[in-house]
Image (tube, rainbow, N blue to C red):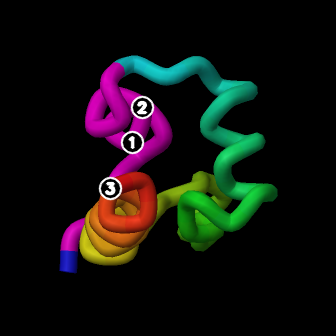
Amino acid sequence: MKYLSFSELRQKLGGRGRSTVYRDIEAGRLPKPIKLGGRLYWIERQVDEALTSHQQEAA
């Protein structure tokens, strides 16, 4: 299982802005982060699944 930092998540999303990423989380388009040692991380598999499901909905 790989954890993505916020900067890695933004890079994976094509350089999206901080506000846009958090709007996507609130809207349920991206999974909520987990807190490890005072920092936020996202599970890469969950992010990939969310992106795949939203691409299928858009098609």
**What residue did someone put label 3 on?**
59
Tell which tag, 2 or 3, sits nearer the viewer: 3
Asked whether residue 34 appears in the rendered view, the answer is yes
25 versus 7 height, above or below: below
Point out residue 10 in the picture as x, y percentages from the top left corner.
Answer: 42, 31
* Residue topped by disc 1: 9
Relative to residue 16, is residue 23 depicted above or below?
below
What residue sits 37% from the left and 75% below the top? 46
| Residue 11: x %, y % from top left | 31, 28
Instruction: Tell me the element at label 3.
Output: loop
Residue 55 occupies which quadrant of the picture? Answer: bottom left
Helix, strand, or loop for circle 2? Answer: helix
Q: On the image, which quarter does residue 17 sit in? A: top right
Direction from residue 2 to residue 25 in the image, left or right = right
Which residue lies under the disc numbered 2?
Answer: 10
Q: CA distance from mark 1 to mark 3?
A: 23 Å
- State yes or no: residue 13 in magenta: yes
Q: Amino acid at mark 3?
A: Ala
